[in-house]
Image (cartoon, rainbow, N blue to C red):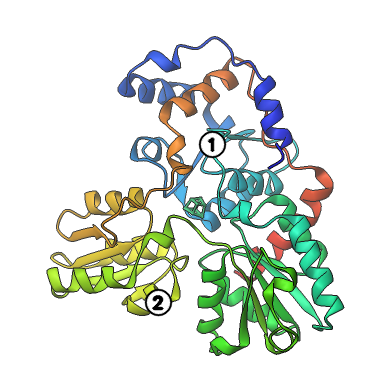
Amino acid sequence: MARTRMEDRMEAYVPPASDAASVSQDETAARIRELKASLGSDVLLLAHHYQRDAVVALADVVGDSLRLARAAAEATARHIVFCGVRFMAETADILTDPGQAVYLAEASAGCSMADMASVDALEAAWDELAAAGAGKVLPLAYVNSTAALKAFVGRHGGLTCTSSNAAQALSWLLSQGAKAFFFPDEHLGRVAARELGLPLTETAVWDRGKARGGLDARAMAEARVYLWNGFCVVHQMFEPQDAAAWREKEPGIRVIVHPECRLDVIGEADAYGSTETLSRMVDAAPAGSKWAVGTEINLVARLAERNPDKLVVSLSPCQAICANMYRTRPKSVLRVLEAVAAGTPPPPVRVDPAVAGQARLALERMLACA
Ligand code: SF4
């Protein structure tokens, strides 16, 4: 895969002298707090729910993609340090003013799902749909996608969505008298379509490895929602039998999962929702209740820790950890803050202004209808 300009700039960047690598975790946290206090309102630290505890404990705002996008859009800080993955930092850059800088705390943190859909592949699919006479098709991109992909969506009249508002966004799009092309996550797209009452026969999986998505003329004509066959490697770890295993072991346990899980897993669950929704369900539950949660392990472990009067376990016996989210450590944050305080900040995430302008259209349509 081609290197991004951000990766090129990070390679060229020489951080100022720092002993961040040699200090203990407690010292690191203390120094981060000192630096945040001295930088004051000039700096904002955003962290996704899937970050490790030590990072979450230092953040000003912790949330899912939608909450963090809103926090970035409303931020006045000149320096925004993002503890998450690249597409999130790109979104923050798109939604902030040119005078603000967004730094990805760990520059190498990407997202394998976002990388499963490229603009070139989508442009080719669009041409194939037009050639096949598929009619009016509008794109709907999960925010877990690159800025370039969001720009594609913006210039084709579509919008982005998060796991909180995918069905709402799909409903808006279908109300325009169009078919929808959902990407990059097949599973979120399918559950959104099901939420709207669309039969599965009106959805068609677009196989990204095949010409015309592997669809014959009839399938292409009959589908109302095309689903790009991308997926989250973390949420694919959950299996339908995990729910049955926990119910047998802990009668009365409630099974709740993220909508990036497969539909057969969601079908076995008592409820599904975004990370914010899953967190609220557990936090608001009565003492003594039991929960098997199908999402990233760092969030599940945190829910268990802050709800000691309930049983909170991971739905999966596997370690459902996002390796990319896990790259960010307090020391990553400390390096960025030390550099900002020294007046030699690392290269910010900068989305090309033309790309950002088109991507903003797609994001703002989402924020308006979310
Ligand atoms: S949990 Fe899945 S979708 Fe989220 S950043 Fe990790 S790989 Fe990407």
Q: Position of residue 232 (x, y in %)?
A: 50, 58
Mark 1 secondary-structure assignment:
strand
Q: Is residue 275 visible?
A: no
First in residue order: circle 2 vs circle 1: 1
Q: Is residue 156 left or right of residue 35?
A: right
Q: Is residue 213 left or right of residue 48?
A: right
Mark 2 secondary-structure assignment:
helix
Q: Is residue 367 above or below residue 325?
A: below
Q: Which mark is residue 44?
A: 1
Q: Amino acid at mark 2?
A: Asp
Q: Amino acid at mark 1?
A: Leu
**On the image, which quarter does residue 52 sit in?**
top left
**On the image, which quarter does residue 365 sit in?**
bottom right
Q: Residue at x 43, y 62 (%)?
A: 236
Q: In front: mark 2 or mark 1?
A: 2
User: How crowded is the residue under tag 1: few (<14 C-alpha within 10 Å), some, or many (20+)?
Assistant: many
Q: Residue at x 48, y 55 (%)?
A: 64
Q: Is residue 354 left or right of residue 91?
A: right
Of residues 357 and 286, the one nearer the viewer is 357
Return the residue found at the far right: 131
Q: Which mark is residue 310?
A: none
Q: Position of residue 156 (x, y in %)?
A: 81, 67
Q: Is residue 167 visible?
A: yes
Q: Quadrant of the N terminus?
A: top right
Q: Which residue is mark 2?
A: 264
Confirm if mark 1 falls within 8 A of ligand 1. no
Q: Is residue 111 above or below residue 17?
A: below
Q: Is residue 216 above or below residue 335?
A: below
Q: Residue at x 50, y 12 (%)?
A: 18
